[in-house]
Amino acid sequence: MSIRREESTLAPSLAARHPIATAAEVGTSAVAEPQTIGDRLGIERPPSPPKWPEPFAPQYREVPEVALSVVEDAFEGYDADPTGLFGKKKAAAGAKVEGAKKPGFLAKAKAKADAAVRKGVAGAKALAKGATDLVSGLSRFDFKLYSDSFTALLAVAKKANGTDLSDKNNYQAFAGDSKYKKVLKTAQAQEAKMTRTESQTKNVKGRESKTISRKIKGRNAACLGFAQVTESSESAEQFGDLIYPPAQAAGIPTLVTLTANDTNGVEGMAPITGLVVEAIDVDNLSANQDGRITVNFVEVKDAGAPASNESMDTDAFEFKYNLCVHGLHVDEDKGIHAGPKILVPVGKIDDVSAYGIDTDEGVESALAHALQGQKLDLLLLWTSFKLVQGAKGLAKGGVLDPAQQKAAKELFGSLDGLSTQNSFAEDVEGDDFDELNELPLTIGN
């Protein structure tokens, strides 16, 4: 069967609705599109996609970001005129720069430095204090050098912000020296018996707050050792205003009160929370008998220290020992007690076995007594030893005010043996004679 195609007699409007009509029949010269089954059934074609994609339209920022050169970026934040090499002009004072870049590393560092300077005198004192600690070797202590009505150095365990104690600032007695291995074992045995008080405040809604406490093993971070002590009105007058609490500023020493739970297990031994370094007053030594002092050291085999015995007058004694250290204990009633005097040898400040202790029978070996743990323990001897070693740097530090510098030289200036030199210091005062006062004199026969 065949289909015969005949010319359409349909009206143009009807032919337009049927795509089989030719271009001539609808009155146009356009070429008809190819026929499909959908066309024959009268189904409309979907709209054709655009022949070309939409033109590219870049997205611009409303406000362009300022791009600095490498040099300008490094020095951004500083108030300096540009060189003109990079074409950037200095903004007027107070002018707001749109899209300005955030401060760089140098600008932030400068801002921090400026903030430190703005803290004023307090900040400067804190920096000076830190420098003094570093130079003198007293970084584990808070200390105060008295130079007004009396000359002395008071030191306690370092506290952050005047309140918080940290075990990291505590010394371990005789640790780190191979010469004292046997002494170290005894020191560790002594410390193993130490206890402290652990306290906790309980707050329960609807009830009154209360503090509970218990005894636990371990030494209190404020404890510098243990010793037999006696009540001291002189110490209370000199240092009573530094009893803790109230809290003091960071770096200022405060004497901590420790309870009966803070013990080393030996009856009569009290915890020491402060150390005082001062010049020896031979008239107040128990060892002084009618103007003569006996120095009697027994042999200490554990430290390789030989025995020695001699008797000397008080002047000769002061050439051999010129400083003493004693501990302070604060009881629960805020009473201050002083421990025995530990005597520091001139020229042997770095030899702990040469340190003495004041007794009724004479000056005896502080190390021998500390090993027995009767008048003092090894921890107290070691912290006193470390304090004096560090404090001698105060005389050479150059960071103290003139009055304190003079006090430091008075205490520590002769620890290296310079006390055998003569000077005019007592006869001539004033800065103009400083060089003359420090000149040694050779005395002929």
Image (cartoon, rainbow, N blue to C red):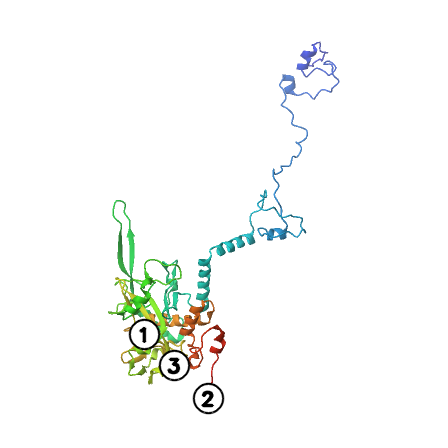
Q: Which residue is mark 3?
A: 319
Specify few, some or many for label 2: CA neighbours under 10 Å numbering under 14, 14-19, or 20 or more.
Answer: few
Residue 172 against residue 73 in the figure, above or below = below
- Residues packed near mark 3 inside 10 Å, few (<14), some (14 to 19) or many (20 plus): some
Q: Amino acid at mark 1?
A: Lys
Mark 2 element type: loop
Q: Position of residue 355 (x, y in %)?
A: 36, 77
Position of residue 27 measured from the top left corner of the image (x, y, whole percent): 74, 14
Counting residues from the start of the chain, the first of labels 3 and 2 encountered is 3
Q: Are marks 3 and 2 in contact (CB under 8 Å)?
A: no
Number of numbered discs overlaid on the protein picture: 3
Query: Which image quadrant is residue 327 in?
Result: bottom left
Nearer to us: label 3 or label 2: 2
Residue ID at (39%, 65%): 143
Q: Nearer the viewer, residue 36 or 292?
A: 292
The x, y position of residue 198, in whole percent, is: 29, 58
**Along the horizontal axis of the image, is 223 left or right of 414?**
left
Q: Residue at x 29, y 54 (%)?
A: 200
Residue 341, disc:
1
Residue situated furthest left in the rendering:
267
- In front here: 337 or 39? 337
Q: In the rendered image, which quarter is residue 445 located in? A: bottom left
Q: Is residue 48 visible?
A: yes
Q: Residues within 10 Å of mark 1 (few under 14, many from 20)?
A: many
Along the horizontal axis of the image, is 58 left or right of 186? right
**Residue at figure coordinates x 43%, y 73% from the top left:** 409
